[in-house]
């Protein structure tokens, strides 16, 4: 049998349920059968389940866009993997039909990425998406320069924690922003050069004091009313990239602060990378050696859930108490 997580209507974590289906058996041309080892939860999964994402669900809908497993069977025409390989699964073509939260998945080989032996299954389940999100902005662009200061809101998120490591690898310095005083010591232990609790004091003033006049770049997943604070915390003519709207509130464009600061504002989605085959290949080749040497290591929360606890796992994710990616482990 194959346990599969599905939902029949939009809503909170409670709409998710596990059903039993026949185990997929025969991979089609270009497909492989993957026995799952661990799964990573994403904020995008929450938005998809709530009906607030880039695309709509087709009910009854599956869910899940990031995981790791072992190849059990291969179909005709498969050339990039073999039986027994450990592989990472990223972004299915249609999450409703092919979401990865299941014991077994049939996956086209173009949705599989290699996994460094140095990473555990829990780390490997989330090794690619956070770092791939960074590649075009942090590696290909010239935003990150040695000794520059980079602001990372939602500092306990998996992408911000990945960015913190990558920024240091590139020779720059980080300021992590968090709403939770309880996370201060943990975030400092994870290597942020500075951590600011946004509910305590004037954020703009503190950033300018730390940086000597303003930060050089901000990579923002929050949006909302904090956008103007980030703009005012940057050096004149610096850049700010928005890649998420975790605030949940309307994000208005602060025209006058942007005019006064001459800050360049852009938006980004990792799907831009997924649709650029050459750049995508370059990103894999860039990060894989760094994973192998554990120079870059995905950060996951210490509270790991069992597959049968899918509802509790999402509730935990949405409570915002976690640090790093929330992981579900397979029970087979």
Image (cartoon, helix red, strand yellow):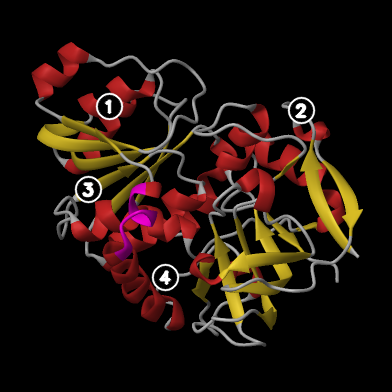
Give the mark nearer the N terminus: 1 vs 2.
2
Q: Position of residue 158 (x, y in %)?
A: 51, 52
Residue mark closest to the camera, 1 vs 4: 4
Q: Secondary structure at mark 2?
A: loop
Start and end of the magenta stretch? 272-277
Q: Mark 4 packing: few (<14 Cα in 10 Å), some, or many (20+)?
A: many
Q: Secondary structure at mark 4?
A: loop
The Cα–Cα distance between marks 3 and 1, rounded to whole angstroms, is: 14 Å
State which quadrant residue 151 falls in. top left
Mark 4 or 2: the one toward you? 2
At mark 3, the secondary structure is: strand
Q: Which residue is mark 2?
A: 9
Q: Nearer the viewer, residue 75 or 135?
A: 75
Instruction: Say whether residue 184 is visible.
Output: yes
Residue 47 belongs to the span the image colors magenta: no
Residue 274 image offset from top left, x and y in percent: 39, 55
State the CA–CA distance, disc 3 to disc 2.
Answer: 44 Å
Per the image, the residue denoted by label 3 is 149
Which x, y percent locates residue 23?
85, 66
- Horizontal side, residue 172 vs residue 9: left or right: left
């Amino acid at each position: 049998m194959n346990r599969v997580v599905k939902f029949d209507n939009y809503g909170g974590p409670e709409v998710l349920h596990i059903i039993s289906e026949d185990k997929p058996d025969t991979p089609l041309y270009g497909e492989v059968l993957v026995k799952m080892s661990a799964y990573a939860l994403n904020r995008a999964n929450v938005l998809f389940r709530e009906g607030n994402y880039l695309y709509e669900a087709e009910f009854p809908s599956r869910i899940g866009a990031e995981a790791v497993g072992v190849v059990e069977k291969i179909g005709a025409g498969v050339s990039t993997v073999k039986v027994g390989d450990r592989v990472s699964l990223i972004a299915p073509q249609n999450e409703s039909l092919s979401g990865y939260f299941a014991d077994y998945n049939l996956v086209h080989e173009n949705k599989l990425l290699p996994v460094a032996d140095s990473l555990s299954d829990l780390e490997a389940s989330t090794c690619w998406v956070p770092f791939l999100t960074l590649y075009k902005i942090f590696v290909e662009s010239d935003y990150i320069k040695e000794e520059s200061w980079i602001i990372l809101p939602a500092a306990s998120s998996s992408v911000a924690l990945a960015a913190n490591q990558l920024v240091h690898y590139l020779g720059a310095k980080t300021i992590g922003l968090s709403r939770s005083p309880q996370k201060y010591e943990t975030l400092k232990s994870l290597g942020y050069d500075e951590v600011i609790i946004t509910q305590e004091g004037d954020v703009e003033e503190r950033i300018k004091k730390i940086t000597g006049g303003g930060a050089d770049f901000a990579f923002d997943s929050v949006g909302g009313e904090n956008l103007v604070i980030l703009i005012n915390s940057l050096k004149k003519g610096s850049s700010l990239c928005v890649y998420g709207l975790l605030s949940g509130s309307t994000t208005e464009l602060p025209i006058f602060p942007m005019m006064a600061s001459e800050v360049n504002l852009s938006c980004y989605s990792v799907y831009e990378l997924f649709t650029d085959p050459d750049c995508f290949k370059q990103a894999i080749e860039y990060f894989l050696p760094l994973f192998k040497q554990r120079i870059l290591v995905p950060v996951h929360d210490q509270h790991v859930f069992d597959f049968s606890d899918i509802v509790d796992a999402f509730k935990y994710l949405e409570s915002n108490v976690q640090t790093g990616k929330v992981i579900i482990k397979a029970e087979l």
